[in-house]
Amino acid sequence: MKCLEEYCSKNITLIVPEPEIIDFKEALIFAFMGFLFSKGENNCLKSATGAKSDSIGGYLYYPL
C-alpha cells in the first residue's frame, strides 16, 4: 500500500477494505460469480483466464 501511495497522485485516495472483507474475499468473489451465472452473464473473462472467449462457468444444483 505504501508503494501505491508513493506512485499515485495526491488527488487519489486509496481505500482499504475492512479486514473481515479481505479475509472473505474468495467467498465474496464466488458469490458474485454465482450471481452473474444466475443472470446469464459472463463470469469467466478471457482476459483473466487466457481462454479464447468470455464464458459463463458453473452449474446450478437443485436440492433433491
Image: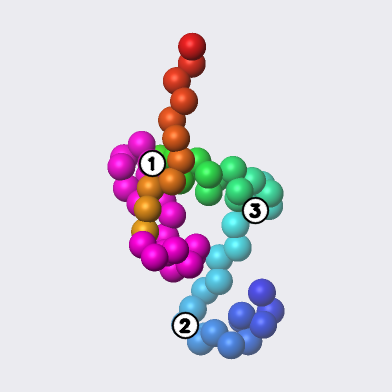
Inter-mark Cα distance, 3 to 2: 25 Å
Relative to 14, does residue 45 appear above or below in the rendering? above
Front residue of 36/24: it is 36
Residue 52: x and y in percent read: 39, 65
Front residue of 14/3: it is 3
Residue 25: x and y in percent read: 60, 50
Disc 2 is placed on an element classified as loop
Q: Mark 1 points at which residue?
A: 37
Residue 28: x and y in percent read: 55, 45
Relative to 64, does residue 52 appear above or below in the rendering? below
The residue depicted at 49 percent of the width and 78 percent of the height is 12
Whether the magenta-drawn stretch holds residue 29 is answered as no
Three-letter amino acid code of the residue under disc 2: Asn
Relative to 26, does residue 2 appear above or below in the rendering? below
Q: Name the residue under label 3.
A: 22
* Of the two numbered discs 3 and 1 in the rendering, the one whose residue sits closer to the viewer: 1
Give the magenta part as a residue range. 36-53
The majority secondary structure of the magenta stretch comes to loop
Within-10-Å neighbours for mark 3: few <14, some 14–19, many 20+: few
> Do the CB atoms of the residues marked 2 and 1 lie less than 8 Å apart?
no
Relative to 28, does residue 48 appear above or below in the rendering? below
Three-letter amino acid code of the residue under disc 1: Phe
Residue 14 falls in image quadrant: bottom right
* Of the two numbered discs 3 and 2 in the rendering, the one whose residue sits closer to the viewer: 3
